[in-house]
Amino acid sequence: MEYSIEMYQTPGGDYPASDFLKGLPTKVRAKAASWINLLQQEGPNLKRPHADMLSGNIRELRISFGRLEVRILYFIHEKQIVLTHGFLKKTQKTPPCEIQRAERYRADWLR
């Protein structure tokens, strides 16, 4: 069963996940695209090391490239996977502010 991928759009018209991906080096962006494709195919069945549950409905796509630890946060609603935003992970745990940001984006999207 395949899911559709959607990039969250802010009320101001920005696409945080898309903007983040565009800012990555070409090879990292290519790897991220293949992981997103895998997420599209597997949906909630995609597990570690590729994806993980964070809090509530918020999940993360986990992309390692050399020393870079790239995280793209997302949530699933019915057959849609909504990518909220991404960041470069620099600490052991995902910063709570990143999870809260994804939760705000999800609440906005659901409205």
Image (cartoon, grey):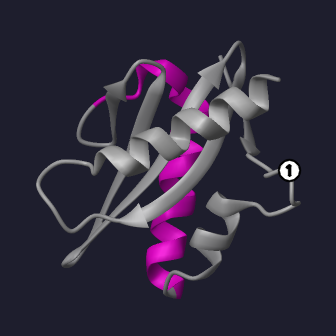
Q: Residue at x 32, y 31 (%)?
A: 54
Q: Is residue 46 above or below residue 65?
A: above
Please identify the quadrant where the C terminus is shown. top right
Which corner quadrant of the image does residue 91 belong to? bottom left
Determine whether 62 is above or below 33 in the image.
above
> What residue lies at 65% left-to-right and 16% top-to-bottom?
1
Horizontally, is 97 left or right of 85 in the view?
left
Q: Percent from the top left, x then y, of residue 87? A: 42, 64
Question: Residue 70 location in percent, x, y?
Answer: 36, 64
Residue picked out by circle 1: 11
Stretch of the chain drawn in magenta: 26-47
Which quadrant of the figure has residue 103?
top right
Residue 64 is situated, as x and y percent measured from the top left of the image, at 27, 64
Of helix, strand and loop, which mostly describes the magenta segment? helix
- The amino acid beneath tag 1 is Pro
* Whether residue 68 is situated above or below residue 94 in the rendered picture: below
